[in-house]
Every structure is written in structure tokens, then in C-alpha cells.
Amino acid sequence: MKKSKNVKASIINIFTFAILIIAVYLAYQFYQSNNFNDFIRSETKLNMSEFKRDKKEKYCNVRSYKITSNEFNDAMFSKEIQVEKNTPYRVTCMIKTKNVEGNKNISSIGAQISILNTLERSVAISGDSDWQKVEFIFNSKSRDIVEIAFRLGEAKGEAWFSDLKIEEGETEQNSNWNFACCIFENTNVNIDDKQIDIQVTNTDITDIKDTIKRFENSCNKLSEGKMTANCDIYQIQTPITSLSYDDKFGYFVALEDVEKQIKNIVNENNYDHIFVVVRLGNEEYQNDIEIKDWIGLGSMDYYGIGFSNIRLPNSSKSYIYKYDKKINQFPEEVFLHEFLHSLERTAEEYGYKIPELHDYKEYGYENENLIGQRQWYKDYMNKEINTSKGYIGLPNEIYTLKPAKRINFEYAYELDIYKEPQNIIEEIRGIFKNLFRNIKLIFIEIGV
């Protein structure tokens, strides 16, 4: 009888132990599926997206981060990180997508890396794509904290993020600026159901090449040697087939309108600024493309790099980009003006207080015959605008505050911000860490 009881007790113990093992296993699997490594999950439309750690679709030996949006939504994993000011950083991850579709046909929609509350972002992946590496480079500027998001932005579908890494690079100390000047030889767009085909002329190309040489010299001369400029000129035959529209400016060329044509040029080089030269009208098409009084547009951005439009005049008789001693001695003015808009924006992002580039009249300057606003630019670039409170203008250090690029990461080192648990001990530590943090948050919420 005693032996029978011992057998029964042993069976119960084994059964209880088995149930305990299963419970621990299920709890561990649940933890792994819902351990987001301190990432915050957020979405614009609440409860419209699903977040999970996926063990089936993964790039490496740890579970991927998966976002599923069955309706158009802006959903993300994000985490605040501390950064050193004026330092380049590179965030990379592997991304896979399935049926990702944006609610608008623009390049900024899809699976991507970005900084919250800014326009800074990586390329966006849409449609169906296998694992591919996505890179996001940025400069911290005056910030010491940024919130990095791995995002399925303004889209629906499924996106997986894996192998998350962040590296800190080295800041360039030189003031040698490299420019890409992309001349689009053809503009083939449909505006209001009218097909418009416009080509640049050989004279246009000659004028722009001459003007670019003058721009290089003027950057050095007007800055009094504080910077140098080197411009590579590209003649692009693949036409522009779409234009963007703004109520203030009318039609213009945005990043998404030319990204396919210039991305290899930019990716294979280390440019600090991009000029896109385009013709949007001629003697035949004078007013078919609505332009609201602009010949150049600056202060735009191509993944962290300054991006400017340079529009060729509709009239072939114009001297705006032609040097003539009696008509125009400063044909590079539009190029310089739009580049200075990028420096103006950079100065503001670093917290400098500077005069607005367009406010030359408020400081007693005039738009002079033959040389335009050259004296204003010279004083603006050298902080020599005389006011009752002293001299103002761009700070001298602005010429070394160039955009972050791949060249900044030749000797980069990886930070451990996105490090995943590597073994069971680290997993257990993570469990208790999350448990204590959640208990602390509960006490804070109830006021204990």
C-alpha cells in the first residue's frame, strides 16, 4: 500500500513538473514574442497595427521586429538615444516587406528608418522585397538626444526589421565642399492632360558649365578663403517625368522626381550639396508649367544633403547665366544664393542666430546693376554685416559643419544600444529588468 502511494506521488510530481516545464516554456515563448528590447511601440491610428517579435521571418539568429498594418497607418518601434553633439551617426538594419502599399505615390512612404519629429529619414521600401540593407546617416547637430524609429510609415502591409545597428563616426574638420551639378537634358511631363517635352540646348549646357566655374571661384573669394568648392557636372539624358507642386512656388523638382536618376551618382560619391538644373519652359511652352516667380529654390534636403533647384530661363535671350561685362558680371548668383540657403538652415539647426538671407534691404544693401547682391553675400558669408549691436552673419565655423556622409565612417565604432540578449542568462536578466521597470511604472501611475 505504501509503495502504491509512493508511485502515485511520483506520478503526480512528474506530471506537476511537466506542467511547470510547459508553463515556463510557454511563458518564455510569450516573452520572446513580446520582448521589444526597450523599444516603444506607437501608431497614429491606435489598435490598427500589430507589433511582434517574429521567429519565422528573421535575418539573423534573433527574432525580427515585425509590424503588420491592415489599414493605412504610421506605425513604428522607436527608442530615445543619447548622442554627442555635432557628430555623424549611421543606423543600419535589414528590412523585408510584403504587400507594403502607401496611401500616396511618393518615395517617403514605406518601411524606413527615421528620426521622430523631423524630416530626416532613410530610403523607404515598399511592395514585396526580400531582406535588404537600409542605411540612415545623420548628424546630431545641436542635439544630445534623438529618437530613432524603425517605421512602416503612412502605409499598409507587413514589414520586418532585423540586425539593427548604430555606429558613431568622425566629424570632418575641413571646409572643402564637394558639389554635384546634375543637368537634366529633357523634361517630359504631363500637366493638366497636356504632354510637355522640353530640352536644354547646347548653349544652355555651355552657359551652366561656365557659370559653375565662376561659382567655384566665388565661393572661395567671397568667403575670403573660408571655404573651397569643387563641382562635378553630370549631363543626365533620362528625362524628368514628374514634378512636384507647392502653393507658394508652383511646380518644382523634389527629391522623388529625380531620385532614380541621381541616386547612384550620390551614393558612389561624397557630395555635400546637390544642384539640379532643369528647364521648365521655353519659347514654345511659356506658361504651360506654372512657376510662381522663382529661378532657384534652396533649403531642400536629399537624405541629409543640401538639395537645390536651378531653373533655366524660358527665353533663350536671357543673360541670367551668361557673363557679359555690360549686362551681367555675376551669373553665378543663383547658385550661390541657393547654396547659402542651405548654410542658413544649417546655422539655425545648430542654434546660431543669423539674419535671413532675403533681408538684405533691412540692413541697407541694394540689388545693384551688373553684380546683383554680391556685396551682401560677401558680408553675409564673413559675418561683416554692420548693425548697432555689432557684426552679424554666418559664423566662421559654418563652413566645417558639412552633412554626414559615408566617408565619416571609415573608422566608425558600433554602439551597443540595440544589442540583443546573446544567451539564456542575458535573457533572464532582461526579464527581471523589464519586470522591475514595469512595476516602477505602475507605482508612478498610482502615485506611490
Image: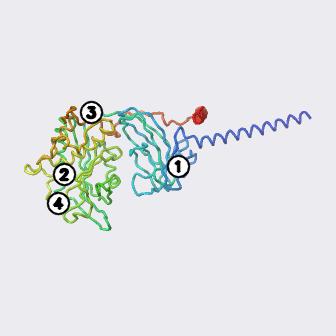
Most distant residue in the left direction: 326
Most distant residue in the front direction: 388
| Cβ–Cβ under 8 Å for marks 3 and 4 | no
Q: Is residue 309 visible?
A: yes
N-terminal-most mark, 2 or 1? 1
Q: Position of residue 244 (x, y in %)?
A: 33, 57
Q: Position of residue 259 (x, y in %)?
A: 34, 52
Q: Name the residue under label 4.
A: 315
Q: Name the residue under label 3.
A: 397
Nearest to the eye among marks 1 and 4: give it.
4
Name the amino acid, label 4.
Ser
Q: Which element type, helix, strand or loop, lies under badge 1?
A: strand
Which disc number belongs to residue 67? 1
Name the amino acid, label 3.
Glu
Q: Report how far apart the C-alphas of labels 2 and 1 lie in the structure.
A: 47 Å
Classed neighbour count for the residue bearing mark 2: other residues with Cα under 10 Å, few (<14), some (14–19), many (≥20): many
Q: Where is residue 56 in the image (x, y as percent from the top left)?
A: 57, 48
Q: Report how far apart the C-alphas of labels 2 and 4 lie in the structure.
A: 15 Å
N-terminal-most mark, 2 or 4? 2
Which disc number belongs to residue 208? 2
Classed neighbour count for the residue bearing mark 4: other residues with Cα under 10 Å, few (<14), some (14–19), many (≥20): few
Q: Is residue 424 visible?
A: no
The quadrant of the image that shows the C terminus is top right
The structure residue drawn at horizontal position 45% and vertical position 35%, both measured from the top left corner, is: 81
What scheme was used to colour the molecule? rainbow
